[in-house]
Amino acid sequence: MSIHEPSGYLRKIALLRDSVPSFRQYPFNLKAVRELDELGFHPKVTYLIGENGSGKSTLMEAIAVALGFNPEGGTINFAFQTAETHSDLHRYLKPVRGARRPRDGFFFRAESYYNLATYIDELDQEPSPSPRLIDSYGSKSLHQQSHGESFFATFLHRFSGNGLYILDEPEAALSPARQLSLLARMHDLIQDHSQFIIATHSPILMAYPDSVIYELTEDGIRTTTWEETEHYVITKQFLNNRDRMLRDLLVDEDED
């Protein structure tokens, strides 16, 4: 499979298929990986979507690590590690960068965000002539905010533009209203020459119009449109036919 998009900071990644030890072992046995040759990235927003277990987070992690980010999230300079659970897929990915270089970058990973927040607090407790790290995140400890507030503090304060931002399920702690706010924040950063790669289940977040959506399926990776995604279709069906769908879902087995 080979998909190409116009140039951004990251143009594409290529799987070094001849170096893969075996396509029968994890993570190479994932259909999305097994069928992959190259994956091109939109210069503004690229979405990776798919069912749980389709390999979204595995692929996102590998892309981020291949670019030099910490597997658990943060900037290029973050070096903390709470558990070595990431796969070695990154060793077999070749990033193809654009002519421009980003001035900023961040790998945001919802599942390990708590570890990132702890790492920032620990670094700021060490004596240093440099400004506190938390000042780049709004000056309030990420542990002293609600989960959603701390997520949004990173998007609002730490993301500074001219950057490459890799987000793995950023909607995990965000209300629908906050997801809309994140879309607006993304647009501001895109206007300031930023590029996003986002894995998400949220039909709100995947609605950014100038983008490409890749769906990870049992047959590999395919491009799709927002209206064709299962996320959009199911959400629309439920909102338009709530009573009927609830009757079907909550039927009493004794009534069968």
Image (tube, helix red, strand yellow):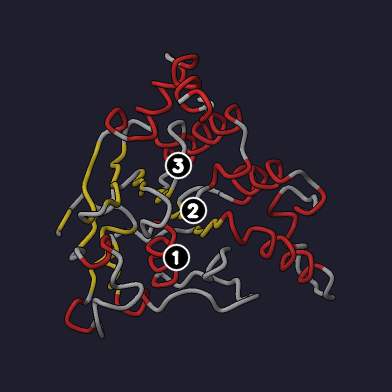
Which badge, 1 or 3, comes first in the chain's sequence? 1
Q: Quadrant of the C terminus?
A: top left
Q: Residue at x 18, y 66 (%)?
A: 37
Q: CA distance from mark 3 to mark 2?
A: 10 Å
In which quadrant of the rendered image does the N terminus lie? bottom left
User: Which residue position is annotated with label 2?
Assistant: 168
Name which of mark 2 and mark 1 comes first in the sequence. 1
Q: Which numbered disc flags the more N-terminal residue, 3 or 2?
A: 2
* Residue 241, position as x, y percentages in the image: 43, 15
Residue at 38% across / 65% down in the picture?
A: 63
Q: Residue at x 43, y 55 (%)?
A: 164
- The residue under label 1 is 61
Q: Are marks 1 and 3 in contact (CB under 8 Å)?
A: no
- Inter-mark Cα distance, 2 to 1: 8 Å
Instruction: Indicate the amino acid at tag 3.
Output: His
Where does the image place residue 28, in percent across and percent down from the top left?
29, 73
Crowd class of label 2 (few under 14; some 14 to 19; many from 20; radius 10 Å)? many
- List the residue tagged with mark 3: 201
Q: Quadrant of residue 200?
A: top left
Q: Nearer the viewer, residue 143 or 106?
A: 143
| Helix, strand or loop for disc 2 | strand
Q: Judge whether 165 appears above or below 155 on screen.
A: below
Real-space CA distance between mark 1 and mark 3, rounded to the nearest whole angstrom: 17 Å
SS state under label 3: loop
Amino acid type indicated by mark 2: Asp
Residue 45 image-quadrant placement: top left
